[in-house]
Amino acid sequence: MANQKQAATKRLKMSERAQQQLDLHFPEFPPQWLWRRKTNDGFTTLPRTLPLVMQAVDAQSKGQPAGHTLFCLWARSPDNPLVTIENPATFASEAGFDGERAVDTWRRRMKRLHTLKLIAPKRGPSGDFHYVLLLNPNVAMEDMRRNGLIQDGLYARFIDRLAEVGGYGELDAIRAFWQDQQLAQTAVMATAEAQAQSAVGQAITLNAPPPPPASGSGASDRSTPASAARG
C-alpha cells in the first residue's frame, strides 16, 4: 500500500511539473490543439512499459513483427482486460494490414502474441480470436526473460522503467506465484511416485508364488498312513 501511495504522489508531482513546463515553453498553443485524458473522450489505460514490451515482441517475431498488433489491442480495450473482436478485418486494418490476406496476416501475429503469453484467446462467432484476454505485459516480459527470450540490454531498460513507474512489485508477485506452483508440482510428483512404488510393491507381493511346504511337515504327513496300517 505504501508503494502505491508513493507512486500516486510521484505521478501527481510529475503532472504538476509537466503543466508548469507546458505553461513556460508552449504558452501560445490553444487548448483545442491539446489532448487531455480528463477532458477529451476516447481514451483507455495503457501500461507505461508497453513500448519496451513491443520491442521485445518484435524481436521474437522477426519477419512478422507483432508489437503494433499488441498496441492496437490495448488501444481497443475498454479499460478492461477482455477485448471482444467481432470484426477481425477492422483490427487487421488498424494493425497496418490490407489486401485479401490482411486478416490471415493479422491472425499469425495474434498467434505469436498468444505464444509469448501476452494474450489468451477464446473462439467465438468471428473465429479463433473472438474473445481476447489481455495478459499483464510486465509478467509476460518476466516470463520471456526466464526463458531466455530477451536480451540483457532491453531487459535492463524494462526493469528501470518498471521501477520508475512503481510496478516492480508485480514481478515479486509473479515470482512468488511461480515458486508456489513449482512447490505444488513437486509435491504432486512426489506423491505420484510414492503411490507408483507402493503399487509396484503390492503387485510383486500378489504375484509371488506361494512358499513350498516345510520338509518336516511333509515327512510327518507321509508316515501317518503307514503308522495307521501297522496299528
Image (cartoon, helix red, strand yellow):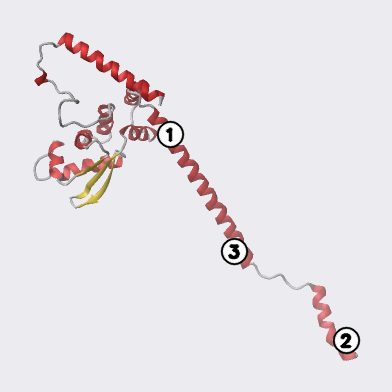
Tag nearer the camera, 3 or 1: 1
228, above or below 159, in the image: below
Residue pictured at 40% horizontal, 35% vertical? 174
Tag nearer the camera, 1 or 2: 1
Q: Residues within 10 Å of mark 2 (few under 14, many from 20)?
A: few
Percent x, y of residue 62: 24, 35
- Asked if labels 1 and 3 touch by Cβ distance under 8 angstroms, the answer is no
- Name which residue type carries label 2: Ser
Q: Residues within 10 Å of mark 1 (few under 14, many from 20)?
A: some
What residue is disc 1 on?
175
* Mark pair 1, 2: CA separation: 84 Å
Helix, strand, or loop for circle 3? helix
134, above or below 40, in the image: below
Percent x, y of residue 186: 51, 44
What residue is disc 2 on?
227
What residue is disc 3 on?
203
- Name which residue type carries label 3: Ala
150, above or below 187, in the image: above
* Mark pair 3, 1: CA separation: 42 Å
Task: Residue lying at the far right in this picture: please name it.
Answer: 231
